[in-house]
């Protein structure tokens, strides 16, 4: 059963604004009021900010901090694609389906997200074509 993201959004601060670089930079500016927690984006809208995500209970490397554990946890209970940026290193990771893909180059983030967000039928067609 995949979680409805409504509860996650309700636990944060409602935003309801079009996604933009400036908006995300303002939200995640260090010490800004909405900086702590996750941003929930649906389609092209920032639905909520300062959202608390459930932390995975799975056995993960000790080097993973709370942010990465929360990304994995959210990906275990939803079909969401979670992008996490390390506060320490600035490294980008993407979580989906309980798996965390680390060290994604910033220049490749858009391509990576497009692959994760491609409609399932398109991904299935590519897989079948490869077989």
Image (cartoon, rainbow, N blue to C red):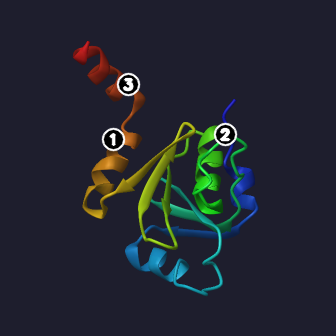
Query: Residue at the location (27% across, 55% down)?
Result: 108
User: Which quadrant, please, contains the N terminus?
Assistant: top right
Residue 55, above or below 130: below
Q: Which numbered circle lies on residue 93?
A: none
The residue pinned by badge 1 equals 115
Instruction: Name the residue nearer the viewer: 11 or 14.
Output: 11
Q: Gap between marks 3 and 2, in whole Å? A: 21 Å
Decide if residue 17 is on the left or right side of residue 37.
left
Query: Residue at the location (36% across, 22% down)?
Result: 124
**Quarter of the image holding residue 12?**
bottom right
Instruction: Name the residue nearer the viewer: 47 or 98.
Output: 98
Decide if residue 51 is on the left or right side of residue 90.
right
Decide if residue 21 is on the left or right side of residue 30.
left
Pointer 3 local density, CA inside 10 Å: few below 14, some 14–19, many at least 20 = few
Quick one: label 3 or label 2, which is nearer the N terminus?
Answer: 2
3 vs 1, front mark: 1
Helix, strand or loop under label 3: helix
The residue pinned by badge 2 equals 77
Query: Residue at the location (76% across, 62% down)?
Result: 11
Quick one: label 3 or label 1, which is nearer the N terminus?
Answer: 1
């Amino acid at each position: 059963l995949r979680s409805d993201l409504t509860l996650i959004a309700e636990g944060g601060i409602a935003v309801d604004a079009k996604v933009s670089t400036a908006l995300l930079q303002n939200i995640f500016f260090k010490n800004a009021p909405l900086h702590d927690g996750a941003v929930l984006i649906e389609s092209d809208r920032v639905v909520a900010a300062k959202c608390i995500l459930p932390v995975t209970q799975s056995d993960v490397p000790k080097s993973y901090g709370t942010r990465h554990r929360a990304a994995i946890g959210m990906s275990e209970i939803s079909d969401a694609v979670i992008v996490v940026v390390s506060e320490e290193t600035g490294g980008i990771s993407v979580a989906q389906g309980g798996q965390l893909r680390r060290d994604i180059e910033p220049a490749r983030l858009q391509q990576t997200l497009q692959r994760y967000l491609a409609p399932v039928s398109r991904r299935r067609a590519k897989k079948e074509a490869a077989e």
